[in-house]
Amino acid sequence: MSELLREQQFSLARHLRDPQRHTPPPGIEARRLKVYRELFYGAIEGLLAGSFPVLRQTLGEPRWHARVRDFYANYRSQTPLFTEIAEAFIDYLQGVELDAPWQLELAHYEWIEAQLYLSDAEDPAHDPQGDLLQGEPLLSCTARVLAYRWPVDRISLDYQPQEAPELPTLLLVYRDAGLQVRFARLAPMAYRLLTEVRGTGLARLHALGGDQEQGLALLESLRAQGIVIGTA
């Protein structure tokens, strides 16, 4: 590739990413440049809008497009895969001044939903009928236990808090048998049972000082929903 062609390609790429700061290479019709700008930006914006519908709605169109344009112009993505653009956007948000204090956590929550919906991961070898007290309970590979400062499951166009609640938001997000992604709020004990302690169900309950009967009932309920898949 000649240096001239290389420079022309880089010049065009810089212009398409940020037309306000970079002029295009000479000799390209303005009408065609406009088509390229709209096509490239529209592809990225469409992918992000599909991944973060609540974030887009809560920010409003002007702030949403300003944020996406800044990401498009300034973030240097390391992935060539369209399916990983949403994750790149979350990485980008960690390095910029946020439009709203809950923006990063809401984006992460929506990204988890999309990841579980699209996941083709397979559960590890397990015993579906295993004893959940004597064995080690296993979560489905399409279930996530999450903790946030902000109530990300409630944020909407009509509810946009400016101060984080005193207690964290503890969530179980999972894909059900019908391939629908659902979420449920967790009590602190249930969250700790599923995340903070390893070993058998009985060992976890003893470590947490939990009631054995209630703990078993919770684990069995999660197994009935396909969230706990059995034991290791």
Image (cartoon, grey):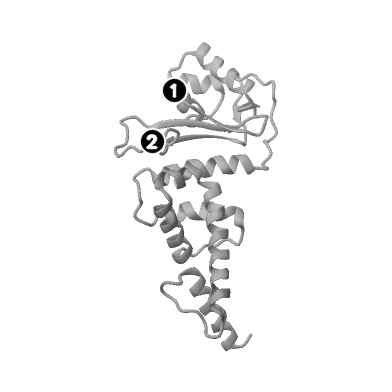
Q: Horizontal placement of 14 versus 155: left or right?
A: right
Depth check: give the residue in front, 99 or 77: 99
Q: Residue furthest front?
A: 31
In the depicted structure, whether residue 129 falls above or below residue 47: above
The number of callouts visible is 2
Q: Residue at x 57, y 20 (%)?
A: 219
Of the numbered discs 2 and 1, the one sitting upstream in the chain is 2
**Rendered-image quadrant of the C terminus:** top right
Identity, as a three-letter code, of the amino acid under mark 2 = Asp
Residue 133 visible? The answer is: no
Residue 103: % across, % down: 40, 46
**Viewer-closest of 35 and 5:** 35
Q: Quadrant of residue 106?
A: top left
Quarter occupied by residue 39: bottom right
Q: Give the structural element (helix, strand or loop) at label 1.
A: helix
Task: Please state which of the two labelled residues, at mark 2 or mark 1, is closer to the viewer.
Answer: 2
In this view of the protein, can residue 19 be seen by the observer?
Answer: yes
Residue that sits furthest to the top in the current view: 213
Residue 131 on image: x %, y %: 64, 18
Q: Nearer the viewer, residue 216 or 117?
A: 117
Crowd class of label 1 (few under 14; some 14 to 19; many from 20; radius 10 Å): some
Residue 51 image point, x, y percent: 54, 47
* Left or right of 87 on screen, residue 148: left
Residue density around tag 2, few if under 14, some if 14–19, many if 20 or more, within 10 Å: few
Tag 2 residue: 158
Tell me the distance, in whole angstroms, between the alpha carbons under discs 2 and 1. 31 Å
> Residue drawn at (37%, 37%), measured in percent from left and top?
150
The image's mark for residue 189 is 1
Disc 2 is placed on an element classified as: loop
- As shown in the figure, which amino acid type bears the numbered disc 1? Met
136 relative position to 110: left or right: right
Q: Which mark is residue 100?
A: none
